[in-house]
Image: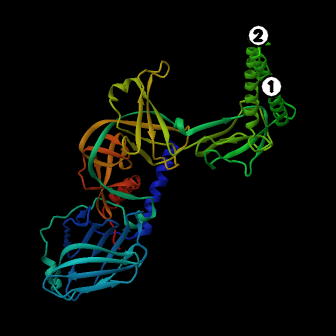
Amino acid sequence: MKNLKISLLLLVLLVTALGISSCSDKTAKTSDEHGNPAAENKANARADQGMEFTLFTSGTELFLESPTLVAGEAASFAAHLTWLADFKPVTGGKLEVILAGGNGPEERFVAAAPAIPGIYKPVVTPRQSGKRELTLVLKTPQGEIRHELGQVTVFATMAETANRDAAQEHRDGGITFTKEQQWKVNFATVQTIKGVARASVSGNGVLHGHPDAEAQLTAIIAGQINAAGSFPHVGMSVKRGQILAYLAPLLGGADDYAALEASEAKARIAHAQAKRERERMEALFAQEAVPEKRLLAARSDEQMIAADLDAATRRLGQYGDSKGGIPIRAPIDGTLADVKAAPGGFVQEGALLFHIADTRRLWLEVSIPESETARLGKPSGVWFSVDGDERVYEFEVGKNAKLIAVGGVVDAVTRTVPVIFELSDNAHELRLGQSVRAWVRTAVANAEAVLIPASALQDESGTTTVYVQTSGESFERRIVTPGAQDGAWVEIKAGIEASERVVAKGAYLVRLAATKTAASGHGHAH
């Protein structure tokens, strides 16, 4: 308990420190946030609060703060730009502010570079009053990204701004977690989507090699291992037929090369002699000089000696062109998963030398508890996670996996039924023998489900919550009702709508920031 309190205290101090190092306090947010650049964009403006915009493109997030625009008056913008690929600040490029439309000339204002990483501060002094279209264009060596923010009002005088929107309702800004704080930590938001949520049953799984893509090479006789060039090592790729090493039998033993060579020579001589004897018996039998029994015996002797010669030839042939030992060849293409031999080492007959596996195709065997087997039906796929790895591995039958079998017998000891998949797209990331926690997909639970990343869910004293981004630096705590988890996504039955953005990474830091926001009662300004 004491350690838990210390950990929570450290996290609170971290969030507090990030807040101190970012910016000073500011008033509540008044912006609408949009999940895509094509959506209608609106902004609320006040003389005391100015304007805020939050806009997402395919590659960036723009969070813009600006004073109310007045013709002839300089307005300092604070444009926060974030790369969505890693949610880190934009550190280079030129930002151009464009005011157009409203029957007035186009006006352009430029910030040549960010004032600090992620924040551009162009000064905008509009000359034309009225309704204008506001666009911010980020120009980088990789290309241009347009942020079309929609219509804004440029007032003719400061006096006009005093009475505008007097009746506008004040909105609470929610939880403040600034861009400067977001950029310094592992943080990301994701737009919720509508999709298919599939039910699944869980079980423990083990990764095996494909039966046709795994081989274990053992010593056929006792002997010494000799290298065939560079000695094989774990992780080395091998080709079918490639010589990995030589196995040299003990000198003087029955399988020594010299002994095998002598045995083969003796068998060849004996066979030649038996052949001549058979031919002699055939000639004598033709002259009726010997009984048929003698001929049949000669033929039988020749056949037996021929069999001995064939065996001796095949034993000697194991050496191939090398007299230094029996070549050990790879029977399949693959990767060396294990090497038990060492050059110069002695091995006993039957000892494991090399383990070869083609890990591009693996078999996953999932043990499903007996109590869940009624829900199995015909599995449509499987997803699983590995200890120490945040990624979720997903495999779909008919795409990158094949259903091999669903066991028809319950194991008497474990009370489980095996479900076996062939995984055809491993990309060498998974390991043979690796244990996983797997979920076998069974059926469609909801074809029109609201889905969010599983990492967005927070367990707060038994209550499942998520943090929704309402503007660039404002967030809202929502209590949600989760449904089926399908891979990296979770169905949300209540509490959130499609197209809203949720915090997928760093949600716990936003949760801690909520305490600081509540204590201060306001946000911050740049």
Query: Which residue is the site of mark 2?
Result: 291
Is the C-beta separation of discs 1 and 2 under 8 Å? no
Label 1 crowd (10 A; few <14 / some 14-19 / many >=20): some
Above-or-below relation of 415 to 56: above
Q: Which residue is mark 1?
A: 276
- In-front residue for pair 33/478: 33
Which quadrant of the rendered structure holds the C terminus? bottom left
Q: How far across and how far down the image is residue 346, in percent?
A: 80, 37
Q: Secondary structure at mark 1?
A: helix
Q: Nearer the viewer, residue 375 or 281?
A: 281
Q: Amino acid at mark 1?
A: Arg
The colour style of the image is rainbow
Picture quadrant of residue 60: bottom left
Residue 390 in the image: state x and y as whole percent. Answer: 46, 48
Label at residue 478: none
Mark 2 Cα-neighbour bin, 10 Å: few <14, some 14–19, many ≥20 = few
Which percent across, then down, holds residue 16? 43, 61
Q: Please name the residue shown 35% across and 71% down the image.
A: 80
Q: What residue is drawn where x is 73% and y is 37%? A: 318
Indicate left or right for 179 with 357 as reference: left
Q: Position of residue 44 (x, y in %)?
A: 19, 70
